[in-house]
Amino acid sequence: MKHVTYIHERSDWTQWQWSDKKLLPLVSRLRMLQGHLLGKLLTLGFDLNVEAQLDAVTLEVVKTSEIEGETLNDEQVRSSVARHLGLDTSGMPAATREIDAVVEMMLAATCDYQTPLTLNDLLRWHSALFPTGYSGLYSIKAGEIRDDSKGPMQVVSGGYGREQVHFVAPSADRLSIELERFLLWFNTPADEQDNLDLVIKAGVAHLWFVTLHPFDDGNGRLTRAITERVLAQSDDSMQRFYSMSAQILKQRNEYYKILERTQKGDSDITEWLVWFLQALEQALLSAQTTTNKIISKASFWQTYRQQPLNPRQVKMLNILLTDFYGKLTTKKWATMTKCSTDTALRDINDLVEKGMLEKSAASGRSTSYEVVL
């Protein structure tokens, strides 16, 4: 079988090269989007600004786990993020220890963005991800660099007997020196790196760390936490308002393919960086949509602040104003608020009379409703 040469086996490994001509137009578009988004957020006022951050961090934590096939409870994640941000959590479900650990790791990655990243940080974050020392049914070395005692670290897909090896990571005996090199580069200021733009640095850091794959498990989540730290540096803000993990999840197959091609390529990583920056651009555009929703929601409640409403109506209007998919019917209202269809219809008709809801034009056979904005 033909031996594949991986990028980390090359003598010029980490002497990264790319085409400025291909990247700079993308970087300038990203910088405009970042400036536009951060400018808009500054005009929101404290409460809405915090809500935007709460949404973004919750999304990042949920999606970084989902990429690994692990589904976290959105409401518990939101509750944990709110508590860590010092917000009121009354009425929210308590988070599990595991969820708290992932939230703490993500916030530590971004809130301390101005401090150097150390090996101890990485070991601490890894321990936090695996508080029981198990990943599923398998015991792992939590908070320790892998030792390859169970064989080389590989990224494999396919069922038993049909395994396909996509990548073989550097051997464990190389890791201490490789991590030292990575951290030295990571902590060197941009002005000492030919003014390396921080969004490009985020893409390089992502590729470099995920290629080292220094732990038994959790390498993807740690890579994305490291990426978030560089993006916080590029925004010069500990507040997160967009989610790179949500975008990677949307393009997961493409992500794995471009990563595999790059890890089997040479030190010219232009193709990877173009993909990474385009994904970041999409993440920023999604965040603009979310921010616009937050502004619309605030303006909606400002308009109807005098209207007497019951808790079911408040709950459903908030859902409709943020993340409601599909059509709102009486049956959906009844299911989501745990009430009878008669009560649901009364709630809806009351909101139609108040001018807050209206019948959808294209309702089809069953009547559906939408918020009046």
Image (cartoon, rainbow, N blue to C red):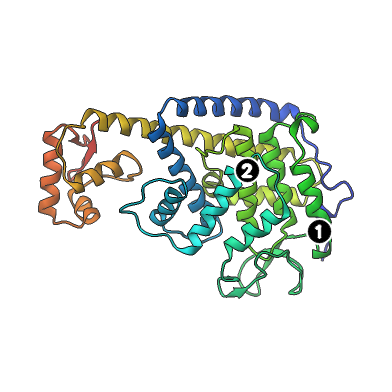
Instruction: Point out residue 17 in the picture as x, y percentages from the top left corner.
Output: 80, 37
Secondary element under disc 2, as helix, strand or loop, is helix
Which residue is drawn at the image coordinates 72% and 42% (left, top)?
204
Left or right: 141, with 264 as reference point: left
- Residue 310 picture quarter: top left
Cα separation between marks 1 and 2: 22 Å
* Marked residue nearer the N-terminal end (1 or 2): 1
Which residue is pictured at 30% across the width and 53% down the height? Answer: 91
Measuring from the top left, give residue 338's x and y in whole percent: 20, 57
Q: Amino acid at mark 1?
A: Ser
Please provide percent x and percent y for residue 163: 67, 69
Number of marks drawn: 2
The circle on residue 5 is none
- Residue at figure coordinates x 65%, y 71% from the top left: 140
Q: Is residue 257 left or right of residue 315?
A: right
Q: Name the image quarter holding the C terminus.
A: top left
Do we see residue 4 in this rendering? no
Quickly name the residue at label 1.
Answer: 176
- Camera-side residue: 30 or 157? 30
223 vs 242, left or right, is right
| Secondary structure type for disc 1 | helix
The type of residue carrying mark 2 is Arg
Report the residue marked by disc 2.
229
- Circle 2 packing at 10 Å, graded few (<14), some (14-19), many (20+), is many
State left or right for residue 78 relative to residue 35: left
The residue drawn where x is 46% and y is 48% is 58
